[in-house]
Image (cartoon, rainbow, N blue to C red):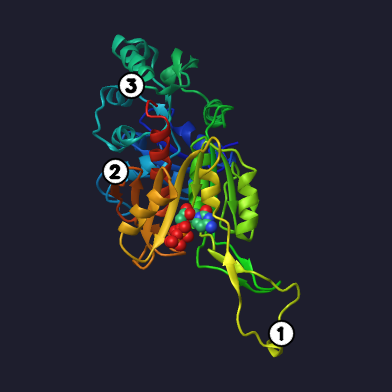
Amino acid sequence: MLDGRRVLLAVTGGVAAYKSAYLARRLIESGAEVKVILTESAQEFIGAQTFAAITGDRPYTSLFSDERSVSPHTELARWAHVIVIAPATAATIGKVASGISSDLVSATLLAAQRPVLVAPAMHTEMWEHASTQRNIEQLEADGYEMVGPFEGPLAGGDVGIGRVAEPDEVVARLKELMGTPDNAKRLLVTAGGTREAIDPVRYVGNRSSGKMGHAIANEGAGRGMAVTLVTTSDEPVSAGVKVTRVESAQEMLEAVAAVEADVAVMAAAVADFKPSDPSSGKLARSDGLESITLEPTPDILASVVARDEPPFVVGFAAETGGVERAVAKAKRKNVDLLVYNDVTEEGSGFGTDTNRVVIVNRAGDTDEWPMLTKQEVAADLISLVLSEINPQG
Ligand code: CTP
């Protein structure tokens, strides 16, 4: 299945473009979220409205004039977990092989750091031309995946090689490509605010929504990692993510201890203190309550850092002051990366869909990211982690 996968479908201008409407439908039926780019010549063969009706989202058609985005090529490249070009014309293949970025499809591909599946379609003579074959070799050398073309009837009554892969073949190939491989990196994510019982009804808690942690878990799964999410939150989780729901810091500690990981992203807002003697029955107002005695909760992140074979650890620091505290915290907590944000800043607090973060590394260097959606922060963070743990690839 393609549950939770974000597929960017780039349709270029050939008669086979009509099949991509069915491909979009099949992708959605397989659980994927789909956005579509149409080149100008694709629109000679099929209308944007067809894709809008199928995907629920108007196709992107221009690098410049889309009120949804000032930079659609970079935003779409970052949004996608995988990109499919179907059909891919000789012209688009040529552009991509040469790194030309003169329209939205070619610019998006140049900006993309995601797997790309190319489904060429053209007349046999064009396919067999030395320049097309050279370009295909170049795409393969650059890491692009191919599906087709196949032999069969072509436009204009001709028969030969050049037929685009059928939608079901493209979907099958995508599933193969996007399946979680046995050697996938194991990602552990903690998310949400813990709840420390005062009595069976009341708790000590915090304002964390879990949105950031869930976005990271979903992104990791979308990018082919084997993800376990330990969370207190009911925010959506994509189908590829294994979820353990917990309430308290102690439960989170135990759930985390059961998970082996190559990467741990500790996005949970763990309560630092818990009532030392929670009541087993509901406390009544008439009984009065002078005070609640608190005791420290276990440090879950520290337990992960202290493993014999610690994973690559990313901590979070939601602060109300300057980044200096986060730099000191990164050192003190001995993490590989620390994601700092100022929760008093507008658009960066709990429950928002956006976040402005600063990344602190082991050396104490800081990298300020612009205001992004939490999904974008998640995408960039996973890219950063993957490049840190696997600098070659
Ligand atoms: N963390 C954790 N378990 C705890 C406390 C924190 O796993 N009991 C993790 C958080 O998920 C976060 C990081 O540690 O990734 C930093 O959390 P924070 O609350 O900012 O740090 P504290 O150690 O509580 O430091 P302070 O209260 O001094 O800011």
Q: Name the mark nearer the viewer: 2 or 1.
A: 1
Q: Which of 323 and 35 is in front in this view?
A: 323
Quarter of the view holding residue 361: top left
Residue 62: % across, % down: 29, 43
C-alpha distance separating marks 3 and 1: 76 Å
Three-letter amino acid code of the residue under disc 2: Ser
Horizontally, is 279 left or right of 325 in the view?
right
Dot placed on the residue nearer the N-terminal end, 2 or 3? 2
Quarter containing the C terminus: top left
Quarter containing the N terminus: top right
Residue at x 72%, y 74% (from the top left corner): 279
* Residue 212 in sight from this viewpoint: no
**Mark 3: few, some, or many residues within 10 Å (few <14, many ≥20)?**
many
Quarter of the view holding residue 247: bottom right
Q: Name the mark nearer the viewer: 3 or 1.
A: 1
Q: Is mark 1 within 8 Å of ligand 1?
A: no
> Which residue matches tag 2?
62
> Which residue matches tag 3?
90
> Which residue matches tag 1?
284
Residue 218: % across, % down: 52, 46
Three-letter amino acid code of the residue under disc 1: Ala
Horizontally, is 220 left or right of 376 in the view?
right
